Image (cartoon, rainbow, N blue to C red):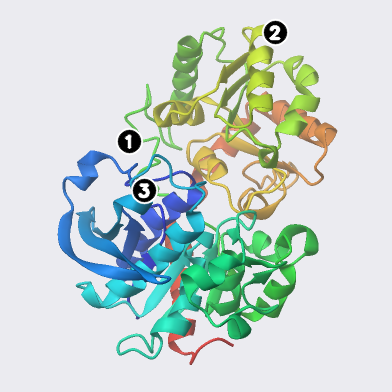
């Protein structure tokens, strides 16, 4: 099978701001277990901890064309737990606090894509598939076609683009086209190319020119084909529908393992779920909540933004706090939601613990201690919190959208099947009704232990997803190019 190079801006454990970092850090390792050679290349960001940088091996340097200029590029390599990762070094572009949101992002990521292509002949590895992730690398397939396809060693390269979230597209002023990308305007600035209402759209470029497009769940792949879900790219996506595949993300089941997790006060498995309650007692103690192991603990581990359903929570918070439960929230986000939760924690002491920060160790304690995890998302391409919650025996309460619909099977009391609870409409009363339904089963000591066991037995390892990606790569191997 053809070797693959993952081209991304984040990969755990080196640098991560969201789910893409988990995917790029985990999927190549699982592909390796299937016998495929898969490696990763990243920018050498200023946010990468020094302990990683100190172990990098310098492979050499070269110049990269950026418009009429040429910029320095250093190439580094690091091996970690069987994963080989390369790093593109340019302190002007990447030695900053934060990965995104700078005024020169168009230039930074145009440079990065060109640098990756220039680096290929210099690697101790010859990929035949470039797997690009999100808008930051989505212009690479266009640059490959225009500037590299006719060079020796590039003609057989194939490209995959994974859309992790279509909300983020990389839209820049039109002058970027000539100044940075050096593309023929008549050839590429078309309705099906880079044009986006007079601007340049990096994600649109990748959708138009990548050989295959994937996204992070089957339901999300269908949602982005609609005017509502496609965010003005649905027309182009429908034209590429035959090359679009939805593959749900997995999690690293060794990393997230309540039977071995040293973050927990007490380790447990699906065969010893009674021990889970001891973690609840310790968390209640740590957060200053009344120690009531018999009281259901509802958790939210989330970015506090509109897309995560915080408006629904705000609308029924009074009614929610009137229920016999404790609510623990962990995360940061928009000021209005942070303030709402801070105020509510003072209004409902002993009922609500608002932790307006993020801490990985605390998040694991919350997963292990909670009985229910609330994810009422307005939109959720895949989601990882519900997968971790299932692994730790915390039953998700979710809205049926994107990956939440694909991974959480609502409990059916008549058949005994299911691993969580869900509601369809983005409506606060529907959410509240579903929480109340979940609480009813929590108090049924015949049903609840079986539900927790079913949740912990759900298989969301990367193995199944890696097999699906392998099929996508095999499709490219059998293809002469885009369909």
Which residue is found at the position 68% from the left and 14% from the top?
Answer: 344
- What is the x, y in percent for residue 286? 45, 12
Vertical placement of residue 107 versus 181, above or below? above
Which residue is found at the position 55% from the left and 57% from the top?
Answer: 164
Residue at mark 2:
347
The reply, left or right, for residue 209 in relation to residue 157 is right
Q: What element carries label 3?
A: loop
Q: Earlier in the sequence, mark 3 or mark 2?
A: 3
In three-dimensional space, the C-alpha distance between marks 1 and 2, rounded to whole angstroms, equals 37 Å
The reply, left or right, for residue 281 in relation to residue 267 is right
Res 36 visible: no
Q: Which mark is residue 12?
A: 3
In three-dimensional space, the C-alpha distance between marks 3 and 1, rounded to whole angstroms, equals 19 Å
Vertical placement of residue 100 versus 249, above or below? above
Q: Which of marks 3 and 1 is nearer the N terminus?
A: 3
User: In front: mark 1 or mark 2?
Assistant: 2
Is the residue marked by circle 1 packed among few (<14), some (14-19), or many (20+) residues within 10 Å?
some
On-image quarter of the C terminus: bottom right
Q: Is mark 2 on a helix, strand or loop?
A: helix
């Amino acid at each position: 099978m053809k070797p693959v190079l993952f081209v991304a801006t984040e990969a755990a454990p080196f640098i991560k701001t969201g789910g893409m970092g988990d995917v790029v850090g985990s999927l190549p390792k699982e592909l390796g277990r299937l016998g495929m050679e898969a490696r990763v290349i990243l920018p050498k960001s200023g946010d990468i901890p020094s302990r990683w940088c100190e172990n990098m091996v310098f492979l050499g340097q070269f110049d990269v064309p950026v418009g009429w200029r040429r910029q320095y590029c250093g190439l580094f390599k690091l091996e970690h737990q069987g994963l080989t990762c390369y790093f593109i070094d340019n302190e002007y572009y990447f030695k900053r606090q934060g990965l995104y949101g700078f005024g020169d992002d168009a230039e930074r990521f145009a440079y990065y894509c060109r640098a990756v292509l220039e680096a290929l002949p210099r690697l101790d590895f010859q990929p035949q598939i470039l797997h690009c992730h999100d808008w930051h690398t989505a212009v690479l397939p266009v640059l490959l076609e225009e500037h590299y396809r006719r060079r020796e060693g590039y003609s057989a390269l194939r490209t995959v683009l994974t859309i992790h979230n279509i909300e983020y597209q990389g839209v820049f002023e039109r002058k970027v086209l000539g100044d940075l990308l050096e593309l023929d305007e008549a050839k590429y600035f078309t309705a099906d190319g880079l044009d986006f209402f007079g601007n340049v759209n990096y994600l649109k470029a990748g959708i138009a020119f990548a050989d295959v497009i994937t996204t992070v769940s089957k339901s999300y792949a269908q949602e982005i084909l609609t005017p509502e879900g496609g965010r003005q790219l649905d027309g182009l996506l429908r034209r590429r529908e035959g090359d679009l595949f939805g593959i749900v993300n997995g999690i690293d089941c060794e990393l997230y393992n309540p039977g071995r997790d040293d973050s927990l006060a007490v380790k447990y498995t699906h065969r010893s779920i009674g021990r889970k309650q001891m973690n609840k007692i310790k968390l209640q103690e740590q957060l200053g909540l009344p120690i009531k192991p018999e009281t259901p603990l509802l958790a939210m581990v989330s970015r506090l933004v509109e897309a995560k359903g915080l408006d629904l929570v705000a609308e029924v918070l009074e009614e929610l706090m009137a229920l016999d439960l404790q609510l623990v929230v962990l995360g940061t986000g928009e000021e209005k939601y942070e303030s709402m939760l801070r105020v509510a924690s003072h209004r409902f002491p002993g009922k609500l613990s608002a932790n307006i920060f993020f801490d990985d160790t605390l998040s694991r304690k919350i997963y292990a201690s909670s009985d229910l995890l609330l994810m009422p998302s307005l939109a959720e391409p895949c989601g990882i919190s519900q997968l971790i919650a299932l692994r730790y025996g915390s039953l998700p309460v979710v809205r049926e959208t994107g990956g939440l619909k694909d991974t959480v099977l609502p409990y059916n009391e008549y058949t005994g099947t299911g691993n969580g609870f869900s509601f369809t409409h983005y409506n606060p009363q529907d959410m509240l009704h579903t929480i109340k339904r979940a609480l009813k089963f929590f108090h049924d000591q015949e049903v609840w232990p079986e539900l927790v066991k079913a949740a912990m037995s759900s298989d969301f390892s990367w193995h199944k997803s890696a097999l699906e990606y392998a099929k996508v790569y095999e499709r490219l191997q059998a293809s002469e190019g885009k369909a």
